[in-house]
Image (tube, rainbow, N blue to C red):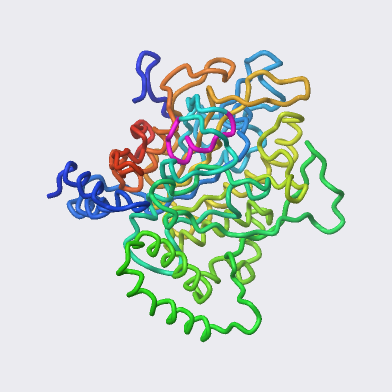
Amino acid sequence: MISMLGSPKRCCDGVTRREALRAGAMTLGAGLGLGLPEFLRAEEASGSNRGKARSVIVLYLLGGAATQDMVDMKPEAPSGVRGEFRPIATSVPGLEVCEHLPLTARWAHRLAVVRSMTHSAGCHNPLPSYTGWEVIPPDIVSTSETYPPSMGSVVESLRKEERALPDYVYIPNYLGWGQSIRRPGPYAGFLGKRFDPLCSECDPHLDDGTPEERPWYPQVLRGVPSIPNATTAEGITLDRLDRRRGLLQQFEGQLRHNQMQVSYDQYDRSQRRAFDLLTSEQARRTFDLSDVDPIRVDRYGRTLFGNSALIASKLVEAGVRFVNVTWDLYWERLRLQHDGWDTHGRNFAILKDYNLPFFDLAFSALLEDLEARGLLDETLVVVMSEMGRTPKINGNAGRDHWTYCYSVTLAGAGIQGGTVYGASDSQAAFVKDLPVRPADLCATIYHCLGIDPEMTVADRTGRPVPIAQGGRPITGILA
């Protein structure tokens, strides 16, 4: 039975913390606040604030998915609002989804749908969803070291062990690569570049003989993410790489005696990660699909997004804690994926013929894969966009930008399945009940990981900043 949460009258809502803040303020430069991992470990050792998720996989639908055509349908709304799709039953009585998500419907008993997401930080702004920071930046096509850190970067900063694969991986490419820009949000900001994600590379392409793509008419996008610089230059053997590593280490003593410790740490971490990736059999194997059962690959759809989701499952299995898979756009760079989820025209045709079927394949395959390997109960899966889309259908049969009400779906570790939290109004235009801000979603993810959402890191001026920007976990969806 579906669990409807909330009331129309109620809104959602050893080491001392002071000592931890003081320790964080004493650290230098881009590493400000890094005395806090010890504080967090002390909390974990005492058994407090322990989450159920070992890892998180974020499926990021860039452009603003029309969630009223996916998981918050309004069949009784006027024709200019409700759209062309009909709702279907799911594995949870009373919870319906779009008819073009039949595989997702079978997993409703493991899903929590938050139908009351809202923010006022501007369109196509990824900062709120990655950081909880609800501020309109000067632009949305570049990043800055003054921005707060992303969730993945905070997780990376709390890393307890060194290995070839980092704790934060972003695939199939950095956000905005296909548009020849670098969108803000997924980075470490004032926490320091050494906690930026490992961003994979990719080669998006169409099948041979496929007609050239046009705006509003997407084609099936193929490709497999790869480790950046995964091949060495001709004549560079692993032995030579090891010798180069030794030479770099000889400079360590000198660098550590000068006043460039933070710069050295950033440089050294990047160099070590590059060397480790190039020489790690585990890292190469994780990104290699050639030895994966073809049936398993087929299940994900063999698209760039599907292959990326499959690699995300392998990364989690290898111990990576935070993986982001973006459904990106590649129009400016490659004349591919003009729209993504930014469906200003032919919204229903794009969703019906392309986006929803391929998303349905990849999402359901990911959940199935994780469960079959015993990983779903310790992996939190989150499906989100930076915003939603207008209730009113425009003259091009599309929906335009809308930040005032949209949905997010969560599944897996720490989540009470078969739940719906919050509600939109009769046209999915505004929040009717239990508004949820991006900061609350971030706090929920941190909570599931066992990280205190109220933990602070110091910005570039030394001011303590809560990692979840003041958000509070959505307790109604937590197991």
Residue at 62% in and 15% down = 76
Q: Is residue 125 within the magenta segment?
A: yes
Residue at 51% in and 86% down = 239
Vertical arrangement, residue 366 with respect to residue 409, above or below = below
Please name whichever residue, 401 or 375, is drawn nearer the observer in this view of the structure: 401
Q: Position of residue 279 (x, y in %)?
A: 51, 77
Q: Position of residue 341 (x, y in %)?
A: 66, 37
Vertical arrangement, residue 145 with respect to residue 350, above or below = below
Q: Quadrant of residue 157?
A: bottom left
Please tell me how many numbered marks the rendered image carries.
0
* Left or right, residue 218 beside residue 127: right
* Left or right, residue 165 beside residue 12: right
> In the current view of this chain or complex, which residue is farthest to the front?
258
Quarter in which the C terminus is drawn: top left
Please name whichever residue, 293 or 238, is drawn nearer the observer in this view of the structure: 238
Q: Position of residue 224 (x, y in %)?
A: 65, 60
- The answer to whether residue 1 of the structure is visible from this angle is no
Q: Position of residue 205 (x, y in %)?
A: 75, 56
Q: Is residue 336 within the magenta segment?
A: no
Please name whichever residue, 241 or 428, is drawn nearer the observer in this view of the structure: 241
Please name whichever residue, 315 or 247, is drawn nearer the observer in this view of the structure: 247
Quarter in which the N terminus is drawn: top left
> In the current view of this chain or complex, which residue is farthest to the left?
14
Q: Range of the magenta residues?
A: 123-134
- The answer to whether residue 449 of the structure is visible from this angle is yes
Residue at 66% in and 20% down = 82
